[in-house]
Image (cartoon, rainbow, N blue to C red):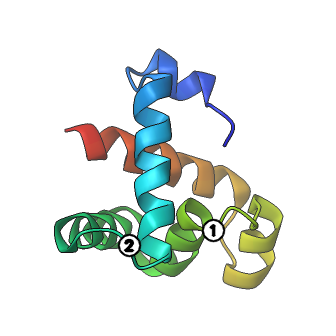
């Protein structure tokens, strides 16, 4: 996972970015707790709206990049990264 400098500037430390990313990966693998799973899905729905599935896939699949999400789910690149930023910030709220 690449650490986002923009998120660091907005108060989401490198450590928290790794923790949140790891939790999303565990959720996709079916290893997250029920509470973690519910939180991830709730935030994806709240932030992603009609793009919730694309956001979830982007956050939880290490083999998927923004180009795939743009083509498969129709999420514009700028919007995808804004949703990711909002997801990480709301995770800590």
Residue at which label 2 appears: 31
Quadrant of residue 19 within the rendered picture: top left
Quarter assignment of residue 26: bottom left
Q: Which quadrant does the C terminus fall into?
A: top left
Residue at image location 49% in from the left, 75% down from the top: 28
Q: Residues within 10 Å of mark 1 (few under 14, many from 20)?
A: some
Question: For the residue labelled by badge 2, is the local secondary structure a helix, a strand or a loop?
Answer: loop
Judge by depth and name the residue closer to the eye, 34 or 78. 34
Residue 72 image point, x, y percent: 75, 83
Report which residue position mark 1 lands on.
61
Residue 64, percent from left and from top: 74, 67
At x 65%, y 70%, the residue is: 75
| Label 2 environment density (alpha carbons within 10 Å; few <14, some 14–19, many ≥20) | few
Q: Residue at x 75, y 60 (%)?
A: 66
Mark carried by residue 41: none
Query: Circle 1 sits in a helix, a strand or a loop, which is it?
Result: loop
* Residue 6 falls left or right of residue 46: right
Name the N-terminal-most of marks 2 and 1: 2
């Amino acid at each position: 996972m690449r650490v986002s400098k923009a998120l660091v500037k907005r108060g989401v430390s490198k450590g928290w970015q790794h923790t949140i990313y790891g939790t999303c990966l565990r959720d996709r693998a079916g290893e997250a707790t029920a509470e973690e799973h519910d939180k991830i899905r709730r935030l994806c729905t709240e932030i992603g709206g009609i793009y919730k599935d694309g956001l979830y896939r982007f956050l939880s699949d290490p083999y998927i990049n923004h180009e795939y999400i743009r083509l498969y789910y129709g999420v514009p690149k700028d919007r995808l990264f804004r949703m990711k930023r909002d997801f990480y910030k709301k995770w800590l709220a």
